[in-house]
Amino acid sequence: MKDAADSTARPPAAPPTGSAHGPRRSRLAAFLDSDLLHSFLRSNLVILAALVSVAIVGAAILAPVIAPHDPYDLKSLSLLDANTPPVWVQGGDPNYLLGTDDQGRDILSTILYGTRSSLAIGICSVLLASALGLSLGLWAGYVGGRTDAVIMRIADVQLTFPAILTALLIDGVALAILKHHTVEGSKFLILVIAIGLSFWVQYARTVRGVTLVERNKEYVEAARLIGIGPLKIMFQHILPNVLGPVLVIATINLALAIITEATLSFLGVGLPPTEPSLGTMIQVGNKYLFSGSWWMVAFPGFTLALLALAVNLLGDWLRDALNPKLR
Amino acid sequence: MLAFAIRRLFEAAFVMVTVALIAFVVFRFVGDPINQIVGQDTSIEDRLKLREELGLNDPIAVQFGRFLSNALRFDFGVSYQMKQPVTAIIAERFPATLELALAAALFAVALGIPMGVYTGIHRDSWLSKIFLTVSLIGVSLPTFLIGILLIYVFSVWLGLLPSFGRGEVVRIGFWRTGLLTASGLKALIMPAVTLGLFQMTLVTRLVRSEMLEVLRTDYIKFARARGLPERAINFGHALKNTLVPVITVIGLQLGAVIAFAIITETVFQWPGMGLMFIQAVQNADIPVMAAYLMLVAFLFVSINFVVDLIYVRVDPRIRILGRPT
C-alpha cells in the first residue's frame, strides 16, 4: 500500500514539489537527516497510523483534563445513570456522549482513563522486556562461553511457549502468592512483570547476534587494549550498534503488550474492574451484550483495535525503513 | 540421524524437567497445601498428621522425586476447588479442547491455502488486496474481540448460532464428542473460526510468499514452455513445493492454537482445558495449574521434537548443521 497517490495527500510539512522522488529527495533527506523521514512521507497509511497513535496517546495523557467525568470518583457515580445509551440513540443523555456502563460511569471518560492504564502497562512492560533482553543479550554475546550457553538455553526453553501463555502463568502464580494480601497498585506491577518477562527473549537473541559480530571489530579491540572495562565496552561502545533493531522490536512489541494486557484483563486475571483498562471495560461490556448494551463493548473494543493496528503499522514501517536490505 | 534424534530427545527431557521443577516449586511453596485441603476448624494435631501422611516433611529432593514419578503416572493430586482428582477433570475436558483445536486448524488450512495460492498467482488483483487487508486486520485484532464481534453478529443480531457451550454431546467410551449432533456442530463454528483466524492469515501469507518464490523458478518456466495448462502448473507443480514449510508452520502453530484456546474458550464458555485453566488461575487452584502447565509443556515439546525430525528428513542441510561439532 506504499505506492501511488503520494502526491495527492502530502502533509503540509513537506515542501511543495511535484514529486517526492528524484532530485528533491536528497534535499528532503538532508532536511531531517533521513531516509526515515522520506519513507515516512511516502506512505499515507503510515502517516495516518502515526496521527492516530499520537491522537490516542495525547488523549490518554490529557485524560484528567479533557475527560468530562472522573470514573475513579465514586461519589459522582449514580446507578440511576447506568446503562444509558450513546447520545444519538433514543434515551441517550447529552451528559454522556458515548453512554454509560453498568455502574453509571461515562464510557468516554472511562475509555480515556482506561487507555491511559493500558498504555502505561504496555510501555512499562516493553521497557522492562527490552532492558532485560538488552542486558542479557549483550552479556551473553560479549562474554560468550558458558554464560552464553546458559542464557540462550533459557531463551530457547521460553521460546517453546507462546508469550501469552508465559504471561498468564507468571500472572497466575503471582496472584496465587498475593491472594491474601493485596497491596494498592500491586496488580499493575504484576501485569508489567508478567508481560515484561514473557517478551525479553526476542531482544536477547537479536542483541546477542549483533554483539557477536561487533565484539571482534577493531574498535572494541582498541577499547579493550587501552584498558576499558567490559561493562563500559558493552554499554557504551557496543550498545549504540544494537539500538536500531531493538527500537523496531520494541515498537512491534508495544502493540503486542497492549493486546496482552487487554487479554489478561479480559480473562479476569489482570486489572480489577474498579481500575478501568480497555480489557476490563470489554470484559464488563461483554456481560451486557445480550441485553442490547452494545456500546459498553463496542467503543473500548474499537479503541483497542485502532491503537493496536496503528502501532503495528508504525512498527512494520520502522522495520522496513531501518532494514537496508529491503530498501 | 539417530544421533540427532537422541540429542533432541535429551534436550526435550531437559525442558520437561525444568518445567516440572517450576511446577513443583509453585505447587509446594505457593500457599500451604494443608490449608487448601482442610477447613478452618481442623486441629493442629490433625494438620501435623496430614502433613506427615502427605510426605510434606520429607527432604525437598525426595518430594520432587515423588512429584516427578507421580506426574509420570498422570497423578497430579486433587483439585483444591473441585475436590476431584485433577486427572479426572483433565480427561473430561481434553476432548473438548482437542476437537476445537482440530476444527480451527482445519478451518485455517482449508481457507488459508486457497487464499494464499490465489494471492500468489494474481498478485495485483483487487481480490488479493482485499484478502491481504483482511488478513492484516485479522492479525491486529485481539482474539477475544473477534469472538465478541462474532457473537454480536451471529447470536445477538441474527440469532443463528449459539453463543456459549458445546451443544449436545455424544459419549463414545470416555470421549464426549460434539461432532455428531447438529447442535454440537453449530456450537463449534464460531469458536473454531475465532481460534483459527490468526492461523489462517499466517497460512495465507506463508503460501503467498512461497508461491511468489516458486513461480519465478526455471522449472515453472519450463512447464509453461511445454504448454501445460495453468491449473496443472499452479497446483501440480508450484503448490506442491510450497507445502513443506507450510506443514512445518502448521505443526508448530498447533501449540499456539492450544494456548490461544484459553482465550477462545473463555469468550465462548467452551468447557475445555483452557477454561479450566483460567478458572484455576482465578481461584489459585495450584494442582490444576501445575497439571495444565506440565501437559501443555509436554504437548509443545513433543510437537517441536516431531517437527525437528521431519525437518531433518526433508532438508538434508540441517542434518549437517545440526550435528554436534
Image: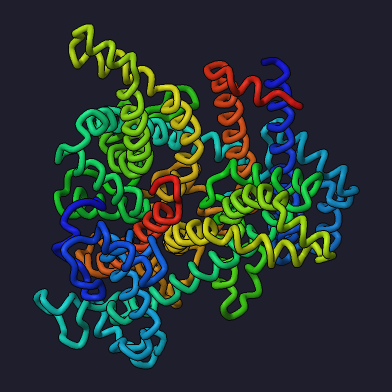
Residue appearing at x 82%, y 57% in the figure = B46
In the depicted structure, whether residue A250 falls above or below residue B22: below
Q: Please name the colour scheme applied to the rendered image.
A: rainbow
* Depicted A102 relative to depicted A297: above or below: below
Q: Position of residue A36 (x, y in %)?
A: 39, 62
Q: Residue visible at 37% across and 34% down?
A: B206
The mark tally for this picture is: 0
Which residue is found at the position 33% from the left and 42% from the top?
B197
The one nearer the camera, B80 or A73, is A73
Nearer the observer, A25 or A39: A25
Residue farthest to the right, as pictured: B59
**Whether residue A304 can be seen here:** no
Judge whether B223 appears above or below B6 on screen: above
Quadrant of residue B21 within the rendered picture: top right
Asked whether, in this view, residue A100 is left or right of residue B240, the answer is left
Horizontal side of residue B53 vs A271, given as left or right: right
- Give left or right: position of A247 versus A29: right
Q: Which residue is at the front of the view, B183 or B19?
A: B19
**Residue at the top extreme, as displayed:** B226
Q: Is residue B66 above or below residue A257?
A: above
Residue at (40, 30) in percent of width and height: B102
Q: Nearer the viewer, residue B60 or B123?
A: B123
Quarter where residue A23 is shown: bottom left
Residue A168: x and y, percent?
55, 55
Spot occupied by residue A283 in the image (x, y as percentages of width and height):
37, 64
On the image, the x and y values in percent for residue A28 come to 32, 68
Q: Is residue B170 left or right of residue A250?
A: left
